[in-house]
Image (cartoon, rainbow, N blue to C red):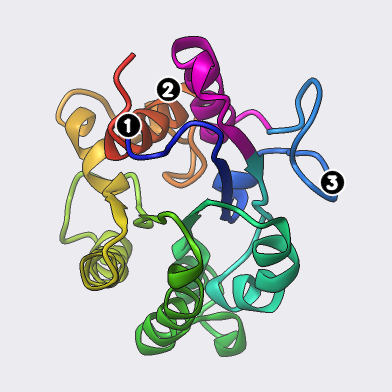
Amino acid sequence: MKIAPGSKLVMIGDSITDCGRARPVGEGLFDALGNGYVNLVAAYLTAFYPQGRIRVVNMGVSGNTVRDLKARWQADVLDLNPDWPSIMIGINDVWRQFDTPLQAEWQVPLEEYRQTLEELVTFTRPKLKGMVLMSPYFIEADPAEPMRARMDRYGAVVRDLSSRYETVFVDTQAAFNTVLDHIHPGALAWDRVHPNTAGHLLLARAFLNGIGFSG
């Protein structure tokens, strides 16, 4: 597995990562890691790789865009001294372009998204043992659907940055695409964004596959 024993993994993002995690730091007893893919990743690592003693921390914040990540990066990532951070951001950057089209100040254009995410990766990557970049997604089978098409462009940015900065890339859209030939998006997420347990399990599996986990 790519993440070495004894490593600290900090997972940061928006509501998909947050999922009701503890404040100020999502780590500790009971439901501190929230009820989403982060909790599932930690559960798999604990159950199938207990000797690894990998410490998982959830620092997702609902509603965040890449701008918000930049504003809290020092406190919520660097100050926690992770060996591996995992970033999944971009859904709200795109979604605000569709659900609040008149509020341009809430939207993050593609080039700003690219520049800001690259700034965070460039600044942080040399300090780390490794990094995971997870693409944003829209749970929609038709790639021509407007929000899905735009989300794919933001996902392509993440793929490119991952390649150039030698991070682990997790293609979350591809993870959902594997099942969308068989079930309706509504069976995974009522709004095609916030997954149910099955959707979070797909995200967790994609992440674990990306880091080379074998249970």
On the picture, is 1 further left or further right than 82?
left
Q: Nearer the viewer, residue 131 or 96?
A: 131
Q: Amino acid at mark 1?
A: Met
Say which of marks 3 and 1 sits in front.
1
Estimate the x, y position of residue 151 in percent, counting from the top left: 32, 64
Instruction: Name the amino acid type tagged 3.
Output: Arg
Residue farthest to the right, as pictured: 24
Relative image position of residue 213 (x, y in whole percent) = 32, 26
In the rendered image, which residue does mark 3 sit on?
A: 23
In the picture, the disc for residue 198 is 2
Look at the image and say whether residue 44 sits in the magenta stretch.
yes
Q: Residue at point 24% right, 64% down?
A: 159
Q: What residue is shown at x 69% (from left), y 78% (from top)?
A: 71
Instruction: Look at 60% across and 88% down and name the residue there.
Output: 105
Q: Secondary structure at mark 2?
A: helix
For the residues marked 1 and 2, what is the alpha-carbon distance in whole angstroms? 24 Å
Report the label total.
3
Instruction: State the extent of the magenta-drawn residues as a range.
Output: 34-56
Report the front residue among 177 and 144: 177
Point out the tag, 3 or 1, that comes first from the N-terminus. 1
Which disc, if any, is residue 1? Answer: 1
How packed is label 3: few (under 14 Cα within 10 Å), some, or many (20 or more)? Answer: few
81, above or below 29, in the image: below
